[in-house]
Amino acid sequence: MEIFNDFSVGLFFMQLVILVVLIFLLAKFAWKPILNSISEREEGIQNALDAAENARKEMQNLQADNEKLLKEAREERDAMMKEAREIKDKILADAKSEASEQTATMIENAKATIKQEQQAAIAELKKKVGDLSIGIAQKVVKKELASQDDQLKLVEDMLQEVTLN
Amino acid sequence: MCTFARNLIAKTTLIKGMLITKKTIQVLTTVTLLFTSLAIFAGGGGGTSSNDGGRVNTKEEIEAYKKHHLADSHDFSLFSYTNDHGERKHVGFPLPVIVWTSKGLKTFMSSAFHHNDDGHEIVEKGGVKLVKIHSKIYELEEGATEVTLDKDYHASNAHKVLDFSMTKSVFGMLLVGGLMFFGFRSLGKSYKKGAIPTGAGRFLEPLVLYVRDEIARPNIGEKHYRKFMGFLLTVFFFIWILNLLGLTPLGFNVTGQIAVTVALALMTFLIVQFSGNKDYWKHIFWMPGVPVPMKIILAPIEVLGMLTKPFSLFVRLFANITAGHAVVMGIAALMILLQEQFSTVGATGISFILTLFLTLIEVLVAFLQAYIFTMLSSLFIGMAVEEHDHH
């Protein structure tokens, strides 16, 4: 057959040798680094995509957290403000009542002091009047012994003096 | 600062571009010099039978020319012409002849045959007389001084020798091997610079990915495909580039040599048999799940199937490429054959359009055959390594 006549044994062996050598050379120096780099790159891309997805999810979580926190903070602020208002009102009320109490006490005290002073003054006055009366009486008694007129006159002077005091 | 940086970048790009252009010009000059120095190495071949300057005019001559092209050749001839003195000139270069004769290994350059292809030029080398008939080298029997041909044009007093010559096909294979090695090694190296290849790698990488993702992975399976990638990628690019090279005017017909396709298919066959697991052999010799008589009947069929698979592989590739070359040459020959009916211009026009069309189809076939060969190889490998856990 023509086809088997064309078959060259030499070419067949040359082809086998070239092919085997080429396969080994290329596998070692070309295909291995190429395929490894490609799969590394693919892994890298996959990882990057996963990381991006994770980041997105985390971001979402964070946002949700933030919102929650914000809400909480707002609530807290409201509560605090309410409390503060209450405290303020209370303080004001307390202050008012205390002030009025204090005023009342002070007034009371003042009144008591005034009364005391008054009493003391009255007592002093009484004492002074008594001393004066005694002095007058002494002098009157001394003068009485000299003359009637003098006594009278003395009393008169004395009285005048008293009024001047 | 910014404009300065931009200027710098623009300048470096410009310089790079200039360097590349310079490099390309250098390469081109080298190639041209190489070819011109090699060209016109021999003149005045004596063996042209027709006296019209070796023109191919008749149907028989066209057939002979086609046959000559489809066969392997010991020289690399690009074209031939007859000069003003009626001498036949062949442009190309000789290739080394390495033959294993009855007296051992003989090597010489193919120019020793002076382009003679019908056994008239006898080369004496260390006591053996060698002649070349239809691109085959014969050794003359002891005592014979001239080759005698019988009516079927077969040498009756000479026998074929084992021919390990670096023929045109071997040259083509080495060329493609070299191209592939340097091309893909540079692609492999380019990954050290960055994850994305630049230059030619941009074109080569998708092809590698194509073989991996479209051919190997789906057929062999995720688990085993990696260890067969070396073979599949090499074979795919080897066949494809050789097919494409066969369409250039260089006139290679490597994948149309039956020895080449047999060697390729044999590789697939061996890989399939050596990577076949227990299940694979069990399915061939003792088919599970069928009654015993059926098992006995199925075994030889399965063995036959095992052998027909590589057979279909090499025949398909060989036949497709040979047919492609033959048809393109035949259509091109219409230019000569239809000259009488359609005039020179008409015949050339018809031939041109048809040849263009067919060559375009051949470009597709070149890829398709490489794809089919690789695809079927991986399919057979996939069958051999498949794990049957359903039995």
Image (cartoon, grey):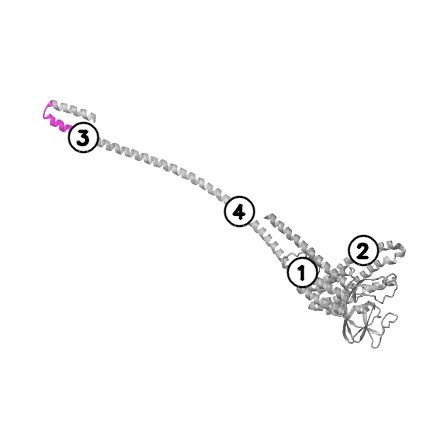
The residue stretch that appears in magenta: A126-148
* Mark 4–mark 3 distance (CA, rounded to whole Å): 90 Å
Q: Which one is in front, B152 or A35?
A: B152
* Mark 3–mark 2 distance (CA, rounded to whole Å): 159 Å
Say yes or no: labels 2 and 1 on the same chain. yes
Residue count near mark 1 (Cα–Cα under 10 Å), binned few <14, some 14–19, many ≥20: some
Q: Secondary structure at mark 2?
A: helix
- Residue holding disc 3: A130
Percent of width and height locating residue B353: 82, 54
Say yes or no: labels 4 and 3 on the same chain. yes
Amino acid beneath label 4: Lys
Above or below, comparing residue A143 to residue B335 in the picture = above
Disc on the earlier residue, 2 or 1:
1
Amino acid beneath label 3: Gly
The numbered mark at residue B356 is 2
* Mark 2–mark 1 distance (CA, rounded to whole Å): 34 Å
Foreground mark, 2 or 1, reads: 1
Extreme residue toward the bottom, this view? B143
- Residue holding disc 4: A68
Report the chain holding disc 1.
Answer: B
The numbered mark at residue B186 is 1
Q: Which one is in front, B287 or B71?
A: B71
Residue count near mark 4 (Cα–Cα under 10 Å), binned few <14, some 14–19, many ≥20: few
Asked if residue B85 lies left or right of residue A131, the reply is right
Percent of width and height locating residue B57: 87, 61
Residue beneath the point at 73% across and 63% down: B176
Percent of width and height locating residue B324: 80, 60
Disc on the earlier residue, 4 or 3:
4
Kindly indicate the quadrant of the structure image that contains residue B86.
bottom right
Q: Secondary structure at mark 3?
A: helix
